[in-house]
Amino acid sequence: MTSSLNSPQNRKSRRVLVTGGAGFIGANFVHYWCRRYPGDRLVVLDALTYAGNPQNLASLEGNENYRFVPGNICDRPLVETLLKEEAIDTVAHFAAESHVDRSILGPAAFIQTNVVGSFTLLEAFRNHWQTLPVPNSGERGPIFLHVSTDEVYGSLGPEDPGFTEQTPYAPNSPYSASKAGSDHLARAYYHTYGLPTLITNCSNNYGPYHFPEKLIPLMCINMLLGKPLPVYGDGQNIRDWLYVEDHCRGLDVVIHQGTPGETYNIGGNNEVKNIDLVRMLCQLMDELAPDLPVRPCESLMTFVKDRPGHDRRYAIDATKIKTELGWTPTVTVEEGLRQTVQWYLAHQEWWRPLLSPEYQDYYRQVYAN
Ligand code: NAD
Ligand code: TYD
């Protein structure tokens, strides 16, 4: 059950390497962690791919406990140097290629970063962790947190119970297959080498700093630009939406209290059909946006060709993390979407530069017909 292991007062400070910290969830995690544990050392390693944005972390510049290192998780000498010179005792591994549609267009980068990159990190940490001082009794030792997805479990039918940690893996996209591969490696490193790995499989996140290609930011931005809102297939696919701040709290308790070698599912308890979600966003935007090129936003909704292999439904059963670690989500989808729409309205200077020529090329490829 819940203990005070993650209470800022009762713990020894940690030295955390955050991979992928310039991306959506990584950046939210870095801000969360700096607020909650200001005495911790935080080193972000990020290759700044199209999805990585230094602006997401700009407000931390000048914080002496924080360091940003541009670099690739596949670069073993760099990773080894960082682990050693920063005496890292905690890895929070977010870096990944994360978008299903891009994995359909070009899977190679997914294998490289998600599988080879995760392997490189695990190998480097395996050599490093035993050089760290032995923790005192009652003190939390080194941790390697591997952040993964519910998509590794495949797709649910309408009446199926949610995914538990026992659900067999059945990934359907190159993205989810590459994440499944890295999950297996993290698990194997615990069983074979005793490396203190923890795996979390979470549902769809949303909130600030979400790159425009994903459903919720894409819809918000298209509404603000008066562009069509492309709903794949019949719009009846279901996702379990998790507000990113709730996710970060879940990762916090797993890092501090999770049992090494274990997996924890983290879900929002917010299952919504895509079509209903887009309608909710339209209503919020109609209500909150002062000037819109097209109103009502629902008039922009357009059904487009379905995604190949599109998983029908994801849902998480988060009983384990609730009963063992005392975590539950707190943000309802109504509250979370309102905050998210307000964030995209107030941060046009953040998202407008992301609609680059490269992004427009990607957009044309996915939404061409
Ligand atoms: P994102 O695409 O927004 O960010 C990924 C970050 O990783 C970027 O900053 C990018 O520059 C960096 N990166 C990519 N390749 C790299 C490499 N080779 N070396 C170093 N850095 C690299 O992703 P996200 O949505 O923040 O997802 C973070 C993690 O959470 C991923 O592992 C993803 O699989 C997982 N996840 C995400 C969701 C979601 O809803 N977004 C849901 C479940 C799980
Ligand atoms: P997405 O945000 O890409 O997350 P994931 O595929 O990892 O669940 O998509 C969420 C859902 O929204 C998914 O069922 C696909 C659908 N979708 C659309 O209908 N239109 C879009 O333009 C996008 C990007 C997604």
Image (cartoon, grey):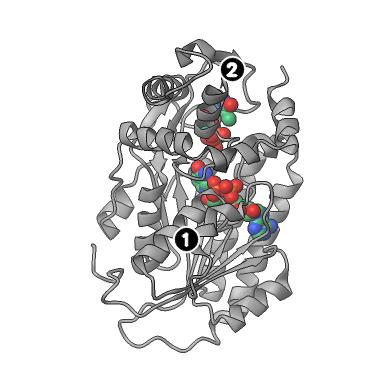
Q: In the displayed structure, would residue 80 be above or below residue 161?
A: below
What's the residue at 32%, 31% (across, down)?
Answer: 334
How far apart marks 1 and 2 lie (CA) works out to 34 Å
Q: Closer to the camera, 140 or 286?
A: 286
Residue lying furthest top in this view? Answer: 299
Residue 162 location in percent, x, y? 38, 37
Left or right relative to 357: residue 227: left
Give the amino acid at mark 2.
Pro
Name the residue that disc number 2 marks: 228
Q: What element carries label 1?
A: helix
Name the residue that disc number 1 marks: 30
Residue 289 appears in which quarter of the rendering? Answer: top left
What's the residue at 49%, 20% (across, down)?
Answer: 292
Q: What element carries label 2?
A: loop
Give the amino acid at mark 1.
Val
What's the residue at 46%, 33% (across, down)?
Answer: 345
Q: Few, some or many C-alpha atoms within 10 Å of disc 2 (few <14, some 14-19, many ≥20)?
A: some
Residue 77 location in percent, x, y? 73, 75
Q: Closer to the camera, 243 or 289?
A: 289
Residue 267 appears in which quarter of the rendering? Answer: top left
Q: Count numbered badges in the picture.
A: 2
Q: In the displayed structure, would residue 244 be above or below residue 341?
A: below
Q: Closer to the camera, 242 or 9?
A: 9
- The image quadrant where one finds the C terminus is top right
Residue 112 location in percent, x, y? 73, 54
